[in-house]
Structure formats: C-alpha cells, structure tokens
Image: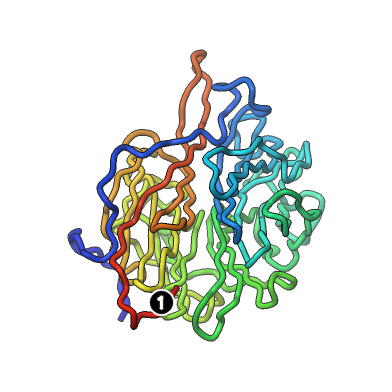
Amino acid sequence: MFGFSQPPIVRHALGAVAPAAKPSVQDVFVSRTLDAAQPWEIVRIPALCRTSTGTLLAFAEARQAVADQSSNMIVLRRRLAGSSKWQPAQIVAHDAPASLNNPCVLVVHDRILLMYQRYPQGTTERTAATGPVSAQTCRTLLQSSSDDGVTWSAPRDITSAVRSPESRSDACGPGIGIQLQHGPHAGRLLFPFNEGVGGRWRVFAVYSDDGGSVWQRGETAPTAPAMLPNETQFAERSDGSVLINSRDQGGSHTRLVGISKDGGETWSPLQKSPGLPDPECMASLLRFSFHPDLLVFCNPADPVHRRNGTIRLSHDGGGTWQMIRVVAPRSFGYSCMCVLPRSRVGLLYEVAERSGAGSAGYRIVYTTVPITVPRRSPKQPDN
C-alpha cells in the first residue's frame, strides 16, 4: 500500500545531485524598483518549460504593484537551444485594467499551451463573483503557440468547462501542467487547479483527452477539516497514477499529498507530508525520468520563512524524499523546473529583495542543477 510517511533521510546510490561549485545564476526578470529599465513595477510567479527544439521559455506576472491583482500582464523571455542569453521580454497577454494571474505551461509535442486566470478590474480572489459566469467572474483563459513561443493565439475562454458556480476564484498551478505517458489515460493533458469556495480552498484537476480542444474538471480532493490545500502541482508516477503535491493554508507548515488512479478524475484523501516542510508557498514538482524512476521536488524548505530553496529526489513515486541540494539558502519563493539534456534540471525561482528606498521588489532568476543518474543496462527501455 502506498504511504506518505517520511523516514529519516537516507542517501541512495540511485539519483543524487553531483557535487558542484556554487551554481551560476542569471537574472531573467527584475522588478522596476531594482532595475528602472524594466517596464513593470513588480514581477512574480515564474513558470518554465523546454520546447521540442530545446528552447527555454520563462514566464512571469508583470505587475503594476505588489498586490496579486494589480493589472498584471503575462510576460515571456526565450532562450534558444545552444545559447546562454535570454532574448528581450515580450508580452504574451495583456488586458488592462483587468489582472492576469497564475501562468501555467505545458508542452505537447511542438505546441505550447499557456493557461492563466483573468480578474476584472477591482476584483480579487476574495471578491470575484460566485454564481453564473458574469462580468465580475474570475475567468480561465488558454493560449497556444506552435512556433516556440514567438507568436501566440488569441485567448480562449474555457471558464464554463472548469469552474464551479460556487467558486469565487480559480487558479491553475502556477507552474506546469503534465501529459500522462502510461496507463489507460496515456495522452491525457492535466492542469492542476485550486479554487476558493466559502473562505476555504480546494484542489482538483482540469483535463483534456483530445489534445486540448475539450476540457473537463475532475472531483476535488478530499481533505480533513483543518487542511486548506492551495497552489498545487502534479507528477505522473511510474504506474500511470498521478501524485498531487499542494501548499497548505491550514497552518500545518508541510506539503499535502495524494494520489489519483484514474487520471485526475478522483483523488485519495490528502495527507500531510512531514518530511516536506513548507512556509505556505508554491513549490515545483517534476518527473525527471521513468527509467530510473525519479521525481524531483523543489521548495523553500523552511516551516516559517520563504528561504532555504532545496531540491529533493524520490525513487518511489513520492513516497519518500531524499534531500540532496540547498540551491539558495537565503530568499527563495515560487519556483518552476524543467528537464534538461545531460542529466540536469533548469530552475526558475523568485528572490525577494528591497530597493535602496526600501520598496519591495523581486528578481526571478535561472540556474541549472546537475542530477547524477546511474547508467542503464542495455535491457532497460528508453525514456
């Protein structure tokens, strides 16, 4: 039976981060309070993917103020395969004075899907309208690109397919969606969601079985009364089941985890994962490889503060985790990872800072982390 209890950390030979010097870190987005050349006041909420051609796409919310709903737009920087330089920022979505939030990205072959939410001017996740879809509703939008993020389709409104009428707010990710590779639902596209209902938070999956034309929502994950699961991420396990890993607004200071055995349609009751301390923050979860079976998890591993950015590995589908690298011992907020060639992960994450005048600001920075994976025998299948 699959469990989430966390034994003492044991170092395994299978999948460990190779010893390395302090990683090189690149600024990708910088708040205007720290760099007047940037055309926004605050930048937050990273999302990252690697396309089929090897191009890296880094997304963020460019805000007019620190608040979550501040006439935000979704911005993007691209880094071509073989290059170490990020191209100038481009605006993917802008609908001022409405606010666009929660970039969540999924690469499907040569197509990139970007999902996010739109809040009407003057509304927030606590004041948007419940009931039937209206002018004051938080809406979910979807855009796509077939040219490595150079150009994007017009936004498509999929609110009616993913929203519950009792929900005041919806949020995909932020971070990444996934496409299932194994089991009866292989090929299914999954985006992780949370919603605000009656002052509480619930998590669920939004999925498509036809490549993204038609979307449906699954059932919310069962929770104990004290749990308030919020921002969430998915990873496929080796048997085709799906691991959910969520922020908890209920004060547990740990991650909440559960399993779906039907492709995200239903979930086991969420459980606390005491081996994954968390200060109530978004975290990053990634399937690194199936052979060997390896998941990667990254978050600010501190029960109170957003600091101590730590990468952990799991060889048993998220049942146990091995802490293997502190990437950023000081400030570390939201993050997102992608798999890179030569056994590495790319990591995009927030660093909170203040300007000389004392104004709040953020940097979103990028680094790479090597993962040492033992060679496979010739009898083992390819990824």
Question: Residue at 74% of width from left, 60% of height from top?
Answer: 131
- Compared across the picture, whether 264 is left or right of 126 comes to left
Which of the 4 image quarters holds residue 2? bottom left
Observer-nearest of 206 and 170? 206
State the residue position of label 1: 238
Which of the 4 image quarters holds residue 176? bottom right
Q: Indicate the position of residue 235 as horizontal and vertical percent values.
A: 46, 66
The N terminus lies in quadrant: bottom left
Q: Label 1 amino acid?
A: Ser
Q: Is residue 197 visible?
A: no
Question: In the picture shown, does residue 130 fall above or below 303?
Answer: below
Observer-nearest of 219 and 108? 108
- Compared across the picture, whether 50 is left or right of 143 comes to left
Q: Indicate the position of residue 121 as horizontal and vertical percent values.
A: 76, 39
Count of numbered marks: 1
Q: Indicate the position of residue 310 as horizontal and vertical percent values.
A: 33, 47
Q: Indicate the position of residue 233 as horizontal and vertical percent values.
A: 49, 60
Question: In the picture shown, does residue 354 fall above or below 158?
Answer: above
Q: Is residue 352 visible?
A: yes
Which of the 4 image quarters holds residue 95? top right
Observer-nearest of 236 and 283? 236
Q: Residue furthest top?
A: 357
Question: In the picture shown, does residue 1 fall above or below 77?
Answer: below
> Tag 1: Cα neighbours inside 10 Å, few (<14), some, or many (≥20)?
many
Coloring basis for residues: rainbow
- Compared across the picture, whether 135 is left or right of 278 comes to right
Question: Residue at 60% of width from left, 61% of height from top?
Answer: 52
The C terminus lies in quadrant: bottom left
Observer-nearest of 118 and 352? 352
Q: Which element type, helix, strand or loop, lies under badge 1?
A: loop
